[in-house]
Image (cartoon, rainbow, N blue to C red):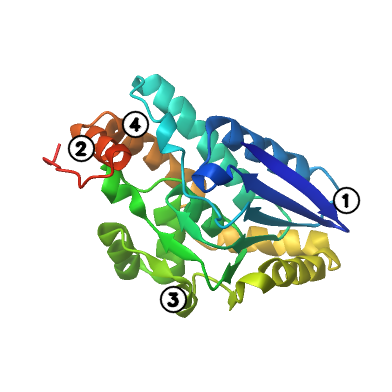
Amino acid sequence: MAIEIQRDGGVAVVTMSNPGRKNALTAQMRAALLAAFQSFADDDAVRAVVLTGAGDAFCSGADVGAMDRPDTAVLRGRMKTMHAMVRAIHGLDKPVVAAVRGVAVGLGWSLALACDLVIASDTAKFAQVFKRVGLAPDGGAVWFLTRQIGFSRAKELVYSARTVPAPEALALGLVHRVVADGELMGQAMELALDYAAGPTFALGMAKRMFAGAVSPTLEQFLETELLVQPQLRLSHDHQEGSAAFREKRAPVFIGR
């Protein structure tokens, strides 16, 4: 379980590597992603970033196997680390391209949404699966989705928890391009290298302008998540949803 970083010219390629669990993010991986993107902000040699996953998946979300039932203070601490990670990716003053193959669900989809552009393999599948374990979306997913596709479509994706295949994600405007699986990294790198050869400072300032064009800000929205998600983690339905996921059965929710 690791975050791997490789350099190619002015591009840093960040690979989430937990392939046995389809790159589910452990606490250590979240901290490593945060540190990596924070370091890129001050590294003039890095002028664009590609974020991807090892093996046949992008990221299956938070590591459900690590989900326990700690107190609210511990949950808030975990949320703050996750939020810092999302802000570091979204707020980096350099272009960030997500290269997505296979599943990008839950927090994994939030990470892709936090990037500037998404290049998707024809194997890519996206989903907001939080409903299945009795939670609301996190990682800024609701903020990103409503701004990209509007409230109605975003609500349908969250409320249904259905899978969105790559062609539909393209039609919705949630991905920039869909390519054959074997061409994914080549296409993502071509785009990132083009950005890396451009005026990095100007692109960074344009990125800030895009961020300032929406309200509330991501930071303000994440404060709402910080109030909501720890309470849900302590709910009956979340405990039932998590148990059902581990036991590979349908959950029986009671609404509290």
Q: Position of residue 33 (x, y in %)?
A: 64, 40
- N-terminal of the pair, mark 4 or mark 3, is 3
User: Which residue does the image show at 82% across and 63% down from the upper left?
Assistant: 196
Q: Residues within 10 Å of mark 3 (few under 14, many from 20)?
A: some
For the question of whether residue 41 can be seen, the reply is no
Residue 230's disc is 4
User: Which residue does the image show at 34% across and 52% down from the upper left?
Assistant: 129
User: Are the two marked residues, 1 and 4, in contact with CB atoms closer than 8 angstroms?
Assistant: no
Q: Position of residue 238 (x, y in %)?
A: 26, 36
Dividing the picture into quadrants, the one containing residue 158 is bottom left
- N-terminal of the pair, mark 1 or mark 2, is 1
What is the spatial separation of the Cα atoms under label 2 and label 3, in whole angstroms? 31 Å
User: Considering depth in this image, is 196 or 60 the residue closer to the camera?
Assistant: 60
Residue 237's disc is 2
Dividing the picture into quadrants, the one containing residue 254 is top left
Mark 1 lies on residue: 45
- N-terminal of the pair, mark 1 or mark 3, is 1
Dividing the picture into quadrants, the one containing residue 143 is bottom left
Mark 3 lies on residue: 172
What is the spatial separation of the Cα atoms under label 1 and label 4, in whole angstroms? 39 Å
Q: Is residue 103 left or right of residue 246?
A: right
Q: Position of residue 86 (x, y in %)?
A: 56, 45
What is the spatial separation of the Cα atoms under label 1 and label 3, in whole angstroms? 34 Å
Which amino acid, by three-letter code, is at mark 4?
Pro
What is the spatial separation of the Cα atoms under label 4 and label 2, in whole angstroms? 13 Å
